[in-house]
Amino acid sequence: MTETLTDIARVGVVGCGQMGAGIAEVAARSGLEVMVAETTGEALEIGRTRLLNSLAKAAERSKITEPERDAAIDRLSFTTDLGEFADRDLVIEAVVENEQVKTEIFQVLDQVVTRSDAILASNTSSIPLVKLAVATSRPDQVIGIHFFNPAPVQRLVELIPALTTSEETVLRAEAVVTGLLGKHAIRAQDRSGFVVNALLIPYLLAAVRMFESGAASREDIDNGMEMGCAHPMGPLKLADLIGLDTVASVADSMYAEFKEPLYAAPPLLQRMVDAGRLGRKSGAGFYPYA
């Protein structure tokens, strides 16, 4: 197991949005050399700022020391060229939840990553891993490594092997997640929603339907679950935190696979996504945000 842990030193993260930046921060704080890629210089600068601000806040709140913050920053590099991922031991894709976009990224990674046993992972929350795996010439080395938001705080990571994933890849990925990153890993089958979202998304959609029908106010729905069930955050606040576009995307993927009505996104959710009211990241969702 020691060899399994030490053979992963260079990590690539594709995407520096909320999830990508969080994953990159976790890896850099864990002592790994991390390269982060974005599509444009502007997106890369926004992502870099997001990541550095998060590290600064962690130091301010004494989650890490200032020397640890500085060391993590020194381990980070940024690029707009996936070709620079050639020497990566592990690459984690964390871009928009769109099957075509992710598939194209995996096809590029397959061409540019030169290490023969490199792990190619996706942070997808709903897209079948086997579809990404077969887009490469190394489907046995493709796996889902699904972090939760915010990645530096949430302890859980879902490991999702495709039908094609080798047991060696699963064990190596698990060793990285638990041994290097210090997370708790659970295994899930390659089914839309995996474990957590298969339970969570129907709950969030039920809250949206309740609000949409006028059965209760947003505050009463959230306070009911926070004060009545000891949830740290109500479902509508949580949907805003996740991103309403992500909630809708996962719901659509689950409905497409299982055809269960409880997985169907309510009309209000889709209208809010169409209007650009995506939650915290856009400044407005079920609640307004500064």
Image (cartoon, rainbow, N blue to C red):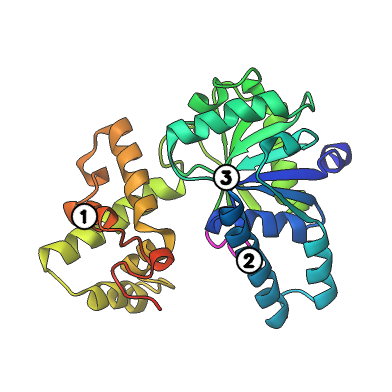
Image quadrant assignment for residue 28: bottom right
Gap between marks 3 and 1, in whole Å?
28 Å
Q: Amino acid at mark 3?
A: Thr
Locate the C terminus by quadrant.
bottom left
- Residue indicated by mark 1: 271
Gap between marks 2 and 1, in whole Å?
31 Å
Image quadrant assignment for residue 133: top right
Residue nearer the viewer, 12 or 40: 40
Find out whether residue 153 is within the magenta segment: yes
- Residue indicated by mark 3: 39
- Residue indicated by mark 2: 49
In the displayed structure, would residue 5 be above or below residue 42? above
Q: Nearer the viewer, mark 3 or mark 1?
A: 3
Residue 166 visible? The answer is: no
- Residue 190, given in percent of the width and then of the height, sits at 48, 32
Q: Secondary structure at mark 3?
A: loop
In the displayed structure, would residue 154 be above or below residue 87? below
